[in-house]
Image: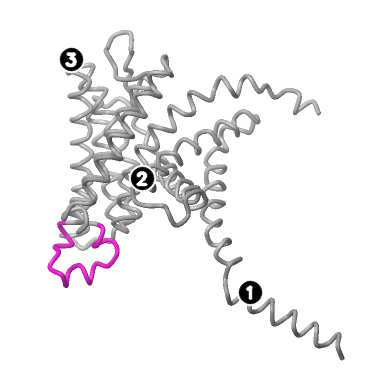
Amino acid sequence: MQYFTSLNPAAFGNALPGNVAQGLIWGIMALGVYITFRLLDFADLTVDGSFATGGAVTVMMTINGYNIWISLLCASLAGLLAGLCTGLLHTKLGIPPILAGILTQIALYSVNLNIMDRHANQALSIDKYNLILSSRNLTKAIIVGLIFAIVLIALLYWYFGTEQGSAIRATGCNPAMSKAQGINIDTMKLIGLSLSNAIVAMSGGLLSQYSGFADVNMGRGGIVIGLAAVIIGEVLGDAILGKHMDFKGRLTFVVIGGIIYYIVIGIVLWLKMPSEDLKLFTAIIVAIFLAVPYLKGQSKSSFKKAGKKAAAMAAGSKEGK
């Protein structure tokens, strides 16, 4: 009882806007993960490095006198180049997707240190610079995050409806058939990976402004958070919309998944669980949401129902005898 009485609902309510703001930023990052993970069917681990690259470029360019929007644009371009490197390692050198992403991720650690003048972190104060968003103004941070998410979802929905976007989706669905139809699947992979990591780096630039600093390790575990947002969003979207779940709905629920993930993390912290176990809780959350579609499918399986029916009939016949 003493434990439950120590929990303060007001404390959770006060932390909720911050969780939503961070969830929106990581939800934007999850859109980049969604492109490679779902559309391109490419297990890309570059994001842990390109997320930190976006933050590093944004902070260093801003403190060196560049406009924050220019800094964020250059951060996205840096992420684009990181994704392109992974794509070239895979398509031109024949390195498997996971290993290509790991190689780029490792290389980006040193690159990010050099970008930040060999410092592990660099501060970016809202008192000195005109930032797009900051944790000091959560209302503005949430509004800005929503605007970025809405604009990005609209652009991705439009782009993946074009001929080139459809070719990227076809490459992810069936590379062999796409190649037979005359699609250059290597080029599509390069474009998809570049676009994905550009979005991830932009999200890193937003988080560095929100947090007030860039850190060389700020992207560590980012792929897990991105996947968590994607999986949570898909499960919720399918549960709510069902057969009406279209492409723009999936993109929207990916961002919602990021928000829900951070709200769950906020609940975990509010329950006074050890903060050093957050990665464990993250893995558990992702495992649960990954298991839901499978368990739901198993419960509706016609073979399973037939087995139960046969068992019931067998039991009935035994009782009749």
Q: Earlier in the sequence, mark 3 or mark 1?
A: 3
Residue at the spot of label 3: 65
- What residue type is disc 1 on? Lys
User: Is residue 146 positioned above or below 292 on the image?
Assistant: above
Quarter of the figure with residue 151: top left
Q: How far is the residue under mark 2 from the one under mark 1?
A: 34 Å
Q: Residue furthest front?
A: 244
Q: Please, what is the three-letter code of the amino acid marked with disc 2? A: Leu
Q: Amino acid at mark 3?
A: Gly
Q: Which residues are magenta?
A: 169-187
Determine which quarter of the picture holds residue 168. Answer: bottom left
Front label number (3 vs 1): 1
Q: Position of residue 189 (x, y in %)?
A: 21, 56
Mark 2 / mark 3, whichever is N-terminal? 3
**Residue labelled with disc 2:** 251
Residue that badge 1 annotates? 305
Nearer to me, 272 or 164: 164
